[in-house]
Amino acid sequence: MKNFVVIVLVLFLSVSCKKELVKQPKGLIEREKMIDIMYDLSLLEAIKYQNPLSLDSSDTSQKRFVWQKYKVDSLQFAQSNIYYAADYEGYKEMFDEIAKRLEKNQKVADSLAKIDEKKAAKEKKNKEKISGQAHKTDKAKLVKVNVDSIRRTMQMKKTIQK
C-alpha cells in the first residue's frame, strides 16, 4: 500500500509540474509579431483614455484595423495571448519590451512637442515684433501728418495777418 501511495504521488507531481500548461494553438502568432500587435493595441487604448471622443465608441473598428495590418484574426490573437500568458515570466518580458518602446516613443514625441512649442513662440515673437514696427510706423505717420497740419495752420495765420 505504501508503494502504491508513493507511485501515485510521484505521478501526480510529475504531471502537475509539467511546463506547458496551455497547448500551443494551431495558428500561434510569432513572439515579435505578438509584441507589435500588443504595442499597437496599447497605443489605441492610450488614445481612447486620453481623449475618449477621438475614437468611436465601438472600438472593434480600430482593433479590426490592427488585425488587418498584421494579417491575423481576433480568435488567433486571443488564443496566442492565452498561450503566451500561461508563461508568466515570458509574458512579463513581452510587456517590459512594450513599455520600453512606449517610453522611447514618448521621449521622441516630447522632444518634437518642445520643438513645436519653441517654433510657435518664435513665430509669436516675430509677429509681435512686426506688429510693434507697424505700430511705430503708424505713429511716425501720425506725427508727420500733425506736423504738416501745424505748418499749414501757421502758414494760413501768416497769410491772414498780412
Image (cartoon, rainbow, N blue to C red):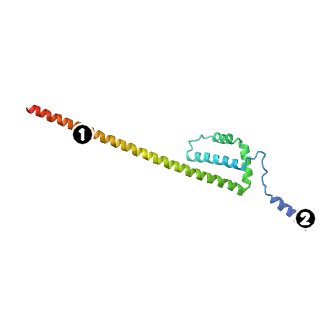
The answer to which of 6 and 86 lies nearer the viewer is: 86
Foreground mark, 1 or 2, reads: 1
> Which x, y percent locates residue 161?
8, 33
Q: Is residue 72 above or below residue 90?
A: above
For image coordinates 16% across by 34% down, the residue present is 153
Disc 1 crowd rating (10 Å Cα; few below 14, some 14-19, many 20+) is few
Residue drawn at point x = 10 percent, y = 31 percent? 160
Per the model, the C-alpha gap separating discs 1 and 2 is: 115 Å
Q: Is residue 115 left or right of residue 56?
A: left
Numbered disc 1: secondary structure: helix
Can you identify the residue that label 1 sits on? 143
114 and 60: which is toward the camera: 114
Name of the residue lying farthest toward the left: 162
How many residues crowd mark 2 within 10 Å: few (<14), some (14–19), many (20+)? few
Amino acid type for the residue under numbered disc 1: Val
How many marks overall?
Answer: 2
Q: Quadrant of the C terminus?
A: top left
Disc 2 is placed on an element classified as helix
Callout 2, which amino acid? Phe
Check residue 4 in the rendering and tell me which mark sits there, or answer none. 2
Q: Residue at x 49, y 49 (%)?
A: 114
| In the rendered image, the vertical position of residue 33 relative to residue 158, given as above or below | below
Residue 18 locus on image (x, y percent): 80, 58
Q: Are marks 1 and 2 in contact (CB under 8 Å)?
A: no
User: In the rendering, which numbered label is found on residue 118?
Assistant: none
Q: Position of residue 70 (x, y in %)?
A: 69, 42
